[in-house]
Image (cartoon, helix red, strand yellow):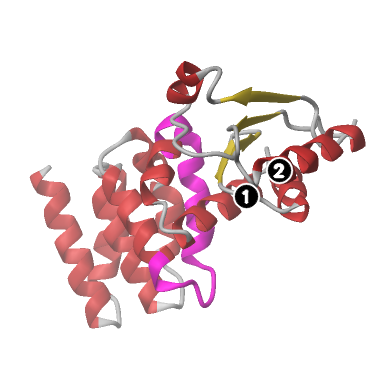
């Protein structure tokens, strides 16, 4: 059975120069079956709906659960429609938000979709990840320290703490400390004997943080 195409929501505004391009692009995706339904709202006519969705400028697009600000090319719209609903798509979307400096939007999305948190983990193992994105991932984890979502990541973070990359082991130890879960303790204790001094130090600090929690 083919996957169900995502629905789309578009906010437009009078005099918006980029809105017609996005509207046409989404309309074509509906015709082609890549988008199941398109709802278009004029912010001037329905400002309360714009406020409800946190829309501050137009065009503003939502494809599936992915919220996109500003103009989007037809190719970009198709790409997001294809990625919507997939685990890999969530990772790509969160990475794009962090690349664009939209940390606050990424935080909001994780609050709405706590199950998305696990999709940040593939970014930790991605080679040549921009520092801005890596810092953003850390900020997102830190913002959810002690949450059920972070505790659910303990097994996966524990596996990352055993990898051959000492930088990744150090990051994993730091995030295990943020989890607030006792299940993280065995993974951290194992790293107290790590060959890398930084990993040993972070593991010790994380253990101390867990004991004080």
Chain-order first, disc 1 or disc 2:
2
How far across and how far down the image is residue 176, in percent?
A: 30, 54
Asked whether, in this view, residue 179 is left or right of residue 79, the answer is left
In the image, 208 versus 66, the foreground residue is 66
Q: Which mark is residue 71?
A: 1
Mark 2 nearby-residue class (10 Å; few <14, some 14–19, many ≥20) = many
How far across and how far down the image is residue 154, in percent?
A: 38, 48
45, above or below 98, in the image: above
In the image, what residue occupies the spot 73% across and 37% down?
23
**Outermost residue, front side:** 15
> Decide: marks 1, 2 in contact (CB < 8 A)?
yes
31, above or below 164, in the image: above
Q: Name the chief secondary structure element in magenta.
A: helix
Q: Which mark is residue 160?
A: none
In the image, 213 versus 60, the foreground residue is 60
In the image, what residue occupies the spot 31% across and 45% down?
183
Q: Is residue 130 magenta?
A: yes
Quadrant containing the C terminus in the rendered view = top left
In the image, 47 versus 14, the foreground residue is 14
The residue labelled by disc 2 is 22
In the image, what residue occupies the spot 54% across and 69% down?
126
How far across and how far down the image is residue 121, in percent?
A: 48, 56
**Outermost residue, left side:** 212
Q: Which residues are magenta?
A: 110-132
Quarter of the image for residue 27 reads top right
Residue at disc 2, secondary structure: helix
Asked whether, in this view, residue 121 is left or right of residue 181, the answer is right
How far across and how far down the image is residue 30, in percent?
A: 84, 33
Asked whether, in this view, residue 207 is left or right of residue 105, the answer is left
The residues tagged by marks 1 and 2 sit, at their Cα atoms, a distance apart of: 7 Å
């Amino acid at each position: 059975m083919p996957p169900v195409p995502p629905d789309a929501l578009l906010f437009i505004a009078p005099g918006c120069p980029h809105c017609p391009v996005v509207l046409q692009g989404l309309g074509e995706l509906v015709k082609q079956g890549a988008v199941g339904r398109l709802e278009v709202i004029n912010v001037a006519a329905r400002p309360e709906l714009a406020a409800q969705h946190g829309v501050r400028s137009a065009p503003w697009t939502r494809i599936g659960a992915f919220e996109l600000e500003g103009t989007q090319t037809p190719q970009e719209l198709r790409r997001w429609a294809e990625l919507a609903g997939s685990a890999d798509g969530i990772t790509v979307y969160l990475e794009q938000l962090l690349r664009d400096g939209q940390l606050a939007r990424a935080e909001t999305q994780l609050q709405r979709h706590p199950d998305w948190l696990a999709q940040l983990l593939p970014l930790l193992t991605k080679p040549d990840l921009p520092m801005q994105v890596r810092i953003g991932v850390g900020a997102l984890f830190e913002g959810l320290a002690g949450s059920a979502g972070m505790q659910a990541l303990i097994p996966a973070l524990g596996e990352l703490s055993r990898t051959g990359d000492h930088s990744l082991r150090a990051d994993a130890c730091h995030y295990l400390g943020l989890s607030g879960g006792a299940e993280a303790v065995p993974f951290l204790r194992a790293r107290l004997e790590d060959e890398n001094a930084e990993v040993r130090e972070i593991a010790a600090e994380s253990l101390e943080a867990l004991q004080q929690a």
